[in-house]
Amino acid sequence: MIKHIVPLFFIVLLSACGSSVDSENNMDLSSTDTIFEYDENQEKLSAVEFNNELTTMQNGMLNQIDLLFQSDSSDVDINLENAIFEASLNLDKLAALSNQEGGMEFVAAMSALMEFYRDELSDNFGEVKEILKKSTFSDENDQFLKEYDLSFAKEEERLFQQVFEAQEQFANENSIKLETL
């Protein structure tokens, strides 16, 4: 069984809304700029929703990858099929996303990650699958699994970094704060 360590990036965007007070007259000024404040908050809420949609997508995919890398002979086929399906489904969702202001680099980075999963699992996971179907592993099999796991994790980490950087840029452009959970 492969023991794949996936660094999880659960990032949530938070925005705070405050009211304006004229200290001289102790008067609440938020009623005079309600429309502006509402518009500003709608933009932030839209950006938060966009981020959360992509973060949820990434989280679901990571769950599929974890299941796959913990597979044994009884469930490796179905877990592989589910992971490839999830990556393909996410790519379709990403292609259909509307143009969220400042979000295209974020979508592109997330798409690159999903393409990696889909292509890697479709094209290069066959030998891993065959090894996982065996009741016992030879030393060569074990070494192959370790090398594959390291190679997979290295590329995944590189793509995670790109997603994080694009997400951070998106948050800065939309004046929202990222928090790691």
Image: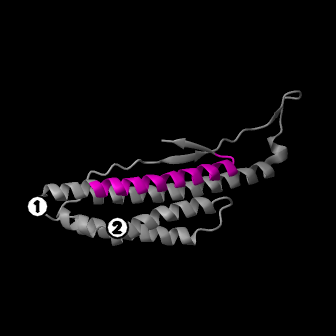
Q: What residue type is labelled 2?
A: Leu
Tag 1 secondary structure:
loop
Q: Which of disc 2 and disc 1 is earlier in sequence?
A: 2
In the rendered image, residue 61, in percent from the top left (x then y), is placed at: 40, 60
Q: Identify which residue is drawn at 52% across, 47% down.
A: 11
Marker disc for residue 109: none
x and y percentages locating residue 171 in the rendered image: 63, 49
Q: Which residue lies furthest to the right in this view?
A: 24
**What's the magenta bit mostly, secondary-structure-wise?**
helix
Other residues around mark 2 within 10 Å, as few (<14) / some (14–19) / many (≥20)? many
Residue farthest along the left direction in this orientation = 135
Alpha carbon of mark 1 to alpha carbon of mark 2: how far? 22 Å
The residue at which mark 2 appears reads as 121
Residue 121 visible in image: yes
Q: Which of 147 and 27 is in front in this view?
A: 147
Residue 89 picture quarter: bottom left
Residue at 63% in and 53% down: 170
Side of 62 relative to 101 (left or right): left
Residue behind mark 1: 135
Magenta span has 29?
no
On the question of residue 1 being in view, the answer is no
- Quarter holding residue 30: top right
User: For the residue carrying disc 1, how many other residues have a C-alpha within 10 Å: few (<14), some (14-19), or many (20+)?
Assistant: few
Image quadrant occupied by the N terminus: bottom left
Residue at (55%, 41%) from the top-left corner? 179
Secondary structure at badge 2 equals helix
Residue 10 percent coordinates (x, y):
47, 47
Q: Residue type at mark 1?
A: Ser
Q: Give the range drawn in magenta.
A: 147-176
